[in-house]
Structure formats: structure tokens, C-alpha cells
Image (spheres, grey):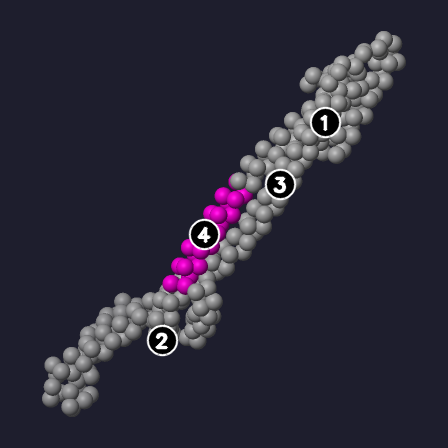
């Protein structure tokens, strides 16, 4: 049954031009012209369908690029803020390093002459060890040394010597502080440079997508009259207004 109906449909389609001619006496007098008119109408509808499809695709592409450009702008703002924070952190790390170096230099200059070592009893050595641990704990609390410094001193690692005179211990601690601040500054500078590269890349991506979005909006505006419904026209109007703000 379905096959028979399909055959009838094909026959009716093939017979349509002839039926149109038979139904119009004027066309019967000029059948060639009538067939040409049918071909013109068919080509017109095909061209209109093609333009409509192109307009829909242009509007959709413009909307997608608009969304991508907005997201890229927001991302670029976040990366810019991240770079500014990294830059401020690097400046603070440099100031902390400079102060640590100055304090170490002053203390070392003030202890230019050797201090007589008179500790002999276990209590005196215990007091020196307590002094060292207290100094390291305070430095770690200020951020001048890592938290592992105290544990290393208690375990006798990393060159910490609790038997030294307190003056010498202070110099050793300040030297370690200056070294720690120097390394912290180097890490902060590296992080700031990486953040700057990320911010520059994000800005470049933002600018590129904004240019592409403006171009896509202009192309969509050029064919907006072929859009099939009001929804796409509204999208296009918003894209055009947005593109004018970017330009």
C-alpha cells in the first residue's frame, strides 16, 4: 500500500506542470513560457531558503562569538587582577628581603670583635639552646623563616648549632632570615612574571574575540532581513548594539 502511494505521489509531482497548464487557458497558449515561470518560481524559493539558512547561521555565529567575547573580557579582568596581586606580593617580598639584609649587616658589624666563649656548664649550654629555639620560633612566626627551621634545629640538622654564643646565634639566625627572604623574593618575581604572561595572553585573546565578534555582528546585520522569525532578529539587534560599544 505504501509503495502504491509513493508511486502516485511521484506521478502527481511529474504531472504538476501539465496540470497547471491545463488549468489556465492563457498558459496553454504559451506552454514554454509557463514552464519557464515555474522554473523561475522554484529557483526563487530555493534562493530564498538558501539566504534564510545563511542568515540564521550568521545570527547564531554572531551570538556565539558575542558570548565568547564577554567571557574572554571577564577572564582577562581576573588575570589582570591576579597579576596586580602578584606584583604587589613581589614588591613586598623585595622590601622584606632588603630589610633582612640591612638588619643582618648591622648586627654583623656590631659583632665585629669575637665574643669570649665562657659557657662550660650543662645549664649554660641548655640556656643557649633555649635561646636558639626561641629565636627560631619567633622568626618562623613572623614569616622570616620556614616553620621547618625549628624542627631542623631541634633535630640538629641544617647546620644549627645550639652551643654557639647567643651573639653568634643571632648572626646565624639573621643570615638564615636574609637567605630565606632572598629565596622568597625570587619565587615571588617568578610568579609575577608568569602572571604577567598569563594576563597578556588573556588580553590578546579578549581583543581577538572582540574583533571577531564585531565582524560577525556586522555580517549578520547585512543579512538580517532574511531571518525567518522575530527571535533571531532580536538576537541580532542586541549583537549590533553590543558591537557598537566595542568599536
Lower sequence index among marks 1 and 2: 1
Do the numbered discs 2 and 3 sit on residues whose CB atoms are within 8 Å?
Answer: no
Q: Quadrant of residue 127?
A: top right
Q: Is residue 75 magenta?
A: no
Q: Quick check: can you spot residue 231?
A: no
Lower sequence index among marks 4 and 3: 3
Vertical relation: 87 (above or below) 237: above
**Mark 1: few/some/many CA within 10 Å (<14, 14-19, 20+):** few
**Mark 3: few/some/many CA within 10 Å (<14, 14-19, 20+):** some
Vertical relation: 164 (above or below) 230: above
Q: Quadrant of residue 52?
A: bottom left
Judge depth for marks 2 and 3 and give the one in front: 3
- Please name whichever residue, 36 or 92, is drawn nearer the observer in this view of the structure: 92
Q: Is residue 114 left or right of residue 13?
A: right
Q: Which residue is mark 2?
A: 225
Q: Which mark is residue 205?
A: 4
Lower sequence index among marks 1 and 3: 3
Magenta residues (range): 194-215
Judge depth for marks 4 and 3 and give the one in front: 3
Q: Which residue is mark 3?
A: 91
Lower sequence index among marks 2 and 3: 3
**Mark 4: few/some/many CA within 10 Å (<14, 14-19, 20+):** some
- Please name whichever residue, 125 or 223, is drawn nearer the observer in this view of the structure: 125
The alpha-carbon separation of the residues under discs 1 and 2 comes to: 80 Å
Q: Secondary structure at mark 1?
A: helix
The alpha-carbon separation of the residues under discs 1 and 3 comes to: 23 Å
Q: Quick check: can you spot residue 200?
A: yes
Q: Is residue 205 magenta?
A: yes
Residue positioned 73% across, 18% down in the render: 112
Residue 73: x and y in percent read: 51, 56
Q: Secondary structure at mark 4?
A: helix
- Magenta stretch prevailing secondary structure: helix
Amino acid at each position: 500500500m505504501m509503495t502504491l502511494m509513493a508511486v502516485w505521489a511521484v506521478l502527481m509531482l511529474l504531472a504538476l506542470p501539465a496540470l497547471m497548464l491545463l488549468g489556465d487557458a492563457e498558459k496553454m497558449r504559451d506552454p514554454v513560457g509557463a514552464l519557464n515561470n515555474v522554473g523561475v518560481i522554484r529557483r526563487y524559493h530555493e534562493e530564498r531558503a538558501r539566504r534564510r539558512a545563511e542568515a540564521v547561521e550568521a545570527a547564531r555565529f554572531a551570538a556565539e562569538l558575542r558570548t565568547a567575547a564577554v567571557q574572554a573580557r571577564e577572564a582577562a579582568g581576573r588575570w589582570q587582577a591576579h597579576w596586580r596581586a602578584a606584583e604587589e606580593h613581589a614588591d613586598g617580598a623585595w622590601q622584606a628581603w632588603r630589610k633582612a639584609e640591612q638588619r643582618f649587616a648591622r648586627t654583623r658589624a656590631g659583632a665585629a670583635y669575637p665574643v669570649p666563649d665562657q659557657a662550660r656548664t650543662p645549664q649554660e649550654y641548655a640556656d643557649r639552646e633555649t635561646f636558639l629555639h626561641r629565636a627560631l620560633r619567633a622568626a618562623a612566626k613572623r614569616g622570616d623563616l620556614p616553620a621547618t627551621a625549628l624542627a631542623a634545629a631541634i633535630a640538629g640538622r641544617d647546620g644549627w648549632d645550639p652551643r654557639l654564643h647567643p651573639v653568634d646565634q643571632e648572626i646565624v639566625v639573621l643570615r638564615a632570615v636574609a637567605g630565606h627572604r632572598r629565596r622568597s623574593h625570587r619565587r615571588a618575581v617568578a610568579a609575577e612574571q608568569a602572571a604577567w604572561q598569563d594576563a597578556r595572553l588573556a588580553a590578546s585573546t579578549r581583543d581577538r574575540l572582540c574583533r571577531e565578534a564585531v565582524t560577525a555582528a556586522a555580517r549578520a546585520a547585512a543579512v538580517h532581513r532574511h531571518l525567518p522569525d522575530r527571535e533571531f532578529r532580536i538576537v541580532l539587534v542586541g549583537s549590533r548594539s553590543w558591537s557598537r560599544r566595542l568599536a
